[in-house]
Image: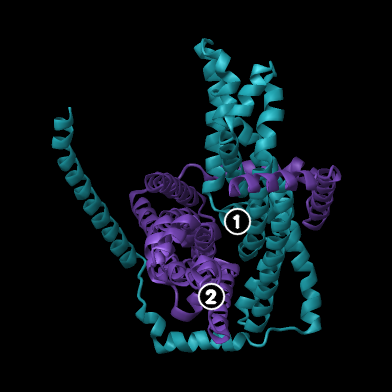
Chain colours: A purple, B cyan
Amino acid sequence: MPRVQSSIADAHSVVGRQPRRWFPLAMAAAVVTLVWWSARGAEVDLPLLLRDGPQAMLSYAGKLFPPDLRPEFLLDTAFGALETLAISIMGSLLATLLAFGAVFFASANLMYAGVLFEREAAGRVRRGLRLSLYLGAKSLLNLLRTIPDIVWATVFVFAVGLGPFPGVLALGVHNGGVLGKLFGEVLENVDRRPIEALQATGATRFQILIYGILPQALPQFLAYALYRWEVNIRAAAMLGLVGAGGLGQRIHIAISLFLEHQLLTLLLAIYVIVTAVDYLSAYLRRLII
Amino acid sequence: MTHRLSATAPSFRESKRALHWLFFGGLLLVFLGSARLAQVDPGVLLDARARANFLRFFAGAFPPDLSSQFLQFLIRPTLETIQISILGTAIAVAIGFPLALLGTATLAYRGVLHAREVGAAPSRRVVRFLPYAASRALLSAFRSIPEFVWAFMFVRAVGLGPFPGVLAIGVAYGGMIGKVYSEILEAVDPQPLEALQATGASRWQIFAYGFLPQAYPNFVSYTLYRWECAIRASAVMGLVGAGGLGQQIEISMRMFDFHQMFTLVGILFGLVGAVDWLSARIRRRVFAR
């Protein structure tokens, strides 16, 4: 019966909300205008680019060859690659722990609304407390997420000194915010039926969380954590720019000192670890889901 | 039959359990190794000097520099950041979309479009497969090299200013957009495609009326997400001299002017929030069709 009703509602919403014909056209016009405005502002000189650009880029690319393959440099590159890998793994771990710690407070259906609370005629004070905890956790995650990882890295380099550890902290804090948002979406979209079934058996809220919500959410949490790992391996390379070790620092040095052959070796190393992490993460995600 | 099954089942389960232990043991080793390599040392955070530095940083940042002179000066870099992100995303789509079409297996060499061609000459299949493999390799090279490295190289090739930032976002995000677009195209529901084919539609018609309408909302959604990332990436681009707010962040950091930096990060925060809000609205419109 509810299903029939909802399909009728769907039909109504389709009939009621006719797509407007002008919308795609207006969007296209807006996009074209914006791109034109941006091209003017970004000092794009298309004729110059087409005339001199390819030449300049090709000659620069030509200077990169051949890659520097001296054994001692290869060893240093390999160490840098391992360091970048380590930063990305630790950063992702820290981010996952942070997000896992915060997300339960930042999820509306665990804190104050929905099935878990429909029986509760809680006092105002308690509800207010819950709501403010929720808002606090949510805005903390937003703050962590919105500040870019490179800015976090400069803050941590300033606080704890140069080296890979500030890179780990920066990745962990920024991605903690990102994962917090993604985890929160998972929690808010869990299937409600097992929760209601558990509630009907008289389970406590904590039991519902353990047996009804977590089994549904954990695999998706892991999948998101792995996805962020893919993003983090690139970011870990970048954080070297502000002195957080790894391949990025070596790339920064190679570019600044015009060591083009070494740069190519380092670029190849980045390509290898990024591709390897992509494949590994995709494989692990398929195992989980 | 049942006897044999029950005989093999326990040993299978045991070997699976052993595999699990092996897996978790390996994972633990990886984490410990990474922690060592990344010089993870939580003690540093509680260290008196680090605490003093944090305090200096955050106390130094309050209040943000809101003098009208500074704010007026920031109008241009802010607009520049928006322009870099829009044009960069546009270029990324221009690079990514064609490569995605070539790099989609169901368009290039298998699936409904090629179902009638099973008996075709192998040479023809190779001709179809080659562009597919080439564009996949190109996309993966574009996206594996992080955007800041592209920015570095484009600064070398075309000089300082916002333009290298645009190109860097265009190339790096082109690789990501191309990959995701082709995944979206490969995941479309095959039933409408088969229905179209049964009516005798040409390949082009199947693409225009079968693939595109299904893929289009996801294209828009992912492109908007990338735009949001492009705004955040501008903070990185500035570090290598590619204009926008990032360059101002870099300058304030160099001069240890945390008041200004706080303002800059605040503006970035606002921009990302605004783009987030705008894309949520557009997304709702596109998916409501």
The amino acid pointed to by label 2 is Ala
Which residue occupies the foreground of this view, B136 or A242? Answer: B136
- Corner quadrant of residue B203: top right
**Where does residue A209 sit, x and y in percent of width and height?**
41, 66
Q: Name the residue under label 1.
A: B152
Observer-side mark, 2 or 1, equals 2
- Corner quadrant of residue B109: top right
The C terminus of chain B: image quadrant = top right
**Where does residue B92 sit, x and y in percent of width and height?**
67, 46
Q: How crowded is mark 2: few (under 14 residues within 10 Å), some or many (20 or more)?
A: many
Q: Mark 2 points at which residue?
A: A137
Look at the picture and state if A66 lies above or below A247: above
Q: What element carries label 1?
A: helix
Spatial CA distance of label 2 from label 1 is: 38 Å
Which residue occupies the foreground of this view, A93 or B241? Answer: A93
**Where does residue A89 sit, x and y in percent of width and height?**
39, 60
Residue at x 75%, y 67% (from the top left corner): B78
